[in-house]
């Protein structure tokens, strides 16, 4: 068994980038919520609405308490001990 945890990411984008960001989400990422954080009254070439795009992903962990990626220093410690 393992514990299922959810990882959330918040991405900031402009109106013209929104469609591309949603359509190119990596496998496993799920759309959660879209929040408008700035909608200018006049839309000019430099003025676009801005959004926060919230996505999530499930991570299954063999540990019941929490999941952490392996530390980056682990291989270096093994090499120093002569165990390569």
Image (cartoon, rainbow, N blue to C red):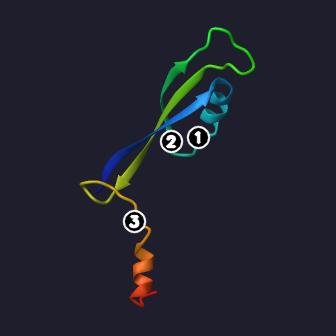
Name the mark on residue 67. none
Q: Whole-Å distance between the Cαs marked 2 and 1?
A: 6 Å
Q: Which residue is mark 1?
A: 25
Q: Whole-Å distance between the Cαs marked 3 and 2?
A: 21 Å
Q: Is residue 84 left or right of residue 25?
A: left
Can you name the residue that lies furthest to the front here?
46
Tell me where residue 23 appears, x and y as whole percent: 63, 35
The reply to whether callout 3 and callout 2 are in contact (CB within 8 Å) is no
Which residue is at 28% across, 57% downward? 1
Q: Nearer the viewer, mark 3 or mark 1?
A: 3
Q: Which residue is mark 2?
A: 29
Can you name the residue that lies furthest to the top here?
41
* Dot 1: element: loop
**Sequence-first disc among 3 and 2:** 2
Name the mark on residue 70. 3
**Sequence-first disc among 3 and 1:** 1
The reply to whether callout 2 and callout 1 are in contact (CB within 8 Å) is yes
In the rendered image of this protein, does residue 52 appear above or below residue 38?
A: below
Which residue is at 52% across, 30% downward? 53
């Amino acid at each position: 068994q393992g514990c299922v945890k959810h990882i959330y990411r918040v991405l900031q984008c402009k109106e013209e980038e929104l469609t591309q960001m949603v359509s190119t989400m990596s496998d496993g990422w799920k759309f959660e919520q879209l929040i408008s954080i700035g909608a200018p009254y006049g839309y000019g070439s430099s003025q676009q609405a801005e959004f926060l795009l919230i996505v999530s992903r499930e991570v299954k962990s063999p540990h019941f308490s929490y999941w952490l990626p392996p530390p980056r220093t682990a291989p270096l410690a093994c090499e120093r001990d002569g165990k390569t």
